[in-house]
Image: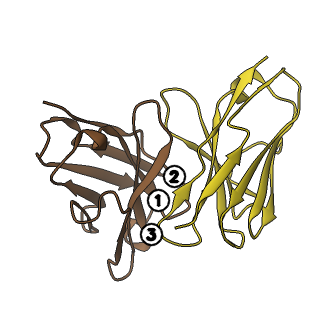
Amino acid sequence: EVQLLESGGGLVQPGGSLRLSCTASGFTFSSYAMSWVRQAPGKGLEWVSTINENDGTTSYAHSVRGRFTISRDNSKNTLYLQMNSLRAEDTAIYFCARRTAFEYWGQGSLVTVSS
Amino acid sequence: DIQMTQSPSSLSASVGDRVTITCRASQDINIYLAWFQQRPGKAPKPLIYRASNLHSGVPSKFGGSGSGTDFTLTISDLQPEDFATYYCQQYNSYPLTFGGGTRVEIK
């Protein structure tokens, strides 16, 4: 059974940093691209970033480029999202998802940016 | 960037009804279109990929069609558990984009 489990969310002040993790199981993690998607309170879904399975090529939404960094450790079956220079508008539930068609999702991790 | 426009943004329907949600892309996305169902407080649930393919375990009451720029999601025989918000999403090119969502409510 495919499982994705996010962790690392919490309350952070504006301008601060946070690193999210997503631990995968039930499939060959190194064979799949992985993504982050977020959802602000009461709002719709927004793609954040994707990392390829092969060469680690990364893609980012305009809203986070230059502030967020996606990475992966295939030896640990873990996906990461390093978030720097956080803003109030980054407040959201962050989901990790498999591939770019988001065929499996984690349960999400809440990030709150507030002073 | 490819804009995804869903309509309607909300609809009211009764148990047993058949409803159709449309999704229009601002440019050709071939068949790289997915649909998701999201219930309050839950992660989105994948329903359809490549415009018309049901994910494993998704009942055949859900149907998807379309290609290019115009797509539809049809839900037959609405049941209480189907009342939720539905999103379309294109994965033809970056940045990946979602539609604004369609909330299906009980009449």
Determine which residue is flagged by label 3: A32
Amino acid type assigned to the residue bearing label 2 in the image: Tyr
Image point (11%, 46%), residue name: A15
Q: Quarter of the image holding residue A16?
A: top left
- Residue A111 position within the rendered picture, expressed as x and y whole percent measured from the top left: 26, 38
Q: How crowded is mark 3: few (under 14 residues within 10 Å), some or many (20 or more)?
A: some
> Are the residues flagged by discs 3 and 1 from a single subunit?
yes
Q: The brown chain is which one?
A: A
Asked whether, in this view, residue A42 is left or right of residue B35, the answer is left
Which mark sits nearer the N-terminus, 2 or 1? 1
Marks 3 and 1 in Cβ contact (< 8 Å) = yes
Amino acid tagged 1: Arg
Which chain did the renderer colour yellow? B
For label 2, the residue is A104
For disc 1, the chain is A
Q: Which of A99 and A115 is in front in this view?
A: A115
Q: In this view, does A3 lie above or below B49?
A: above
Q: How far apart are marks 2 and 1 (CA)?
A: 5 Å
**Disc 3 secondary structure class:** loop
Q: Which mark is residue A98?
A: 1
**Callout 1 crowding tier (Cα within 10 Å): few <14, some 14–19, many ≥20:** many
